[in-house]
Amino acid sequence: YGCTRHFLKKSRRGGKKCNKVQSFLHLLSLLKRHCLPDLMLMKYKNTCERFCFLHQRCLETMWQYIFLFSRQGKVRLQKWYNTYTQKEKKKIMRDLLTIILARKPKMCSFLEYKDSKVCYKRYASLYFVVGIEPTDNELIALECIHRYVELLDKYFGNVCELDIIFNFEKAYYMLDELILGGEIQETSKKKVLSAIQAQDSLQEDSEIKQALEEMGLL
């Protein structure tokens, strides 16, 4: 935590050039309970290496599940990263739908549910709900949700609920590129979108080839 405070002071001196660093350090300072003891940082020679190490550890957030639902309680997308029975999945979604829809807009976006923590965020008519481990970082989970929404918005262009209903496979593709096995795989929007575009081109080529074969041109 001391190295975080040291970096925060230096970022303030740097002005606008250090805004991104300052935001990360502010996040780490709010979550000092997630930082590791100084003994585990002794092998890093300078403060910059220590900051990078702490930043990497804070990004190790394990998701248990994610699902999207509308204000009417209709589930539009769901992905499970832990093993649950069909009965357990239905109970989790039913309980969380009831709890979250009953909460007021100004209430906290975190809540405890059984042996996990739940983070949720509303965007337009959709709620994005993520279940994480009890020791995981809630703010990082919210940042991942926001990054996923940014990807959807960038791909569809001002994404809405209907885009996810009629193009749900694209939403799953983007989620798999961002989160793999419940852990963050890629944070770069550019790389994720390039992978999705490559999948789209392959799909278009296969559809064209199939159409030509049906017409007897191949």
Image (cartoon, helix red, strand yellow):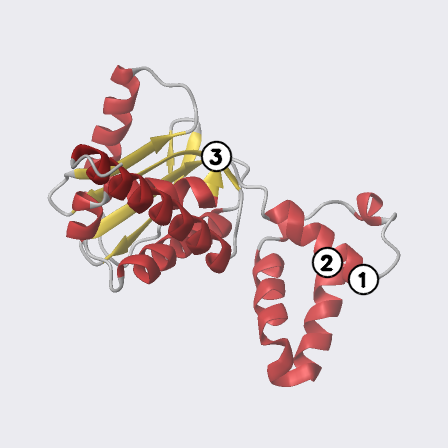
| C-alpha distance separating marks 3 and 2 | 24 Å
The answer to whether residue 136 is above or below residue 80 is below
| C-alpha distance separating marks 1 and 3 | 30 Å
**The disc labelled 1 sits on which kind of residue?**
Thr
Query: Secondary structure under badge 1?
Result: helix
Q: Are marks 1 and 3 in contact (CB under 8 Å)?
A: no
Query: Secondary structure under badge 2?
Result: helix
**The disc labelled 3 sits on which kind of residue?**
Gly
Mark 3 or 2: the one toward you: 3
Say left or right for 23 vs 67. Answer: right
Q: Residue at x 63, y 81 (%)?
A: 17
Crowdedness near tag 3: few (<14), some (14–19) or many (≥20) residues, C-alpha within 10 Å: many
Q: Quadrant of residue 82?
A: top left
Residue 127 visible in the shown view: yes
Q: Residue at x 41, y 19 (%)?
A: 83
- Residue that numbered label 3 is attached to: 182
Q: Residue at x 87, y 49 (%)?
A: 42
- Residue that numbered label 1 is attached to: 47
Crowdedness near tag 1: few (<14), some (14–19) or many (≥20) residues, C-alpha within 10 Å: some
| C-alpha distance separating marks 1 and 2 | 6 Å
| Residue 75: x %, y % from top left | 19, 37
- Residue that numbered label 2 is attached to: 51
Whichever of callouts 1 and 3 sits on the residue coming sooner in the sequence is: 1
In the rendered image, the residue lying farthest to the front is 217
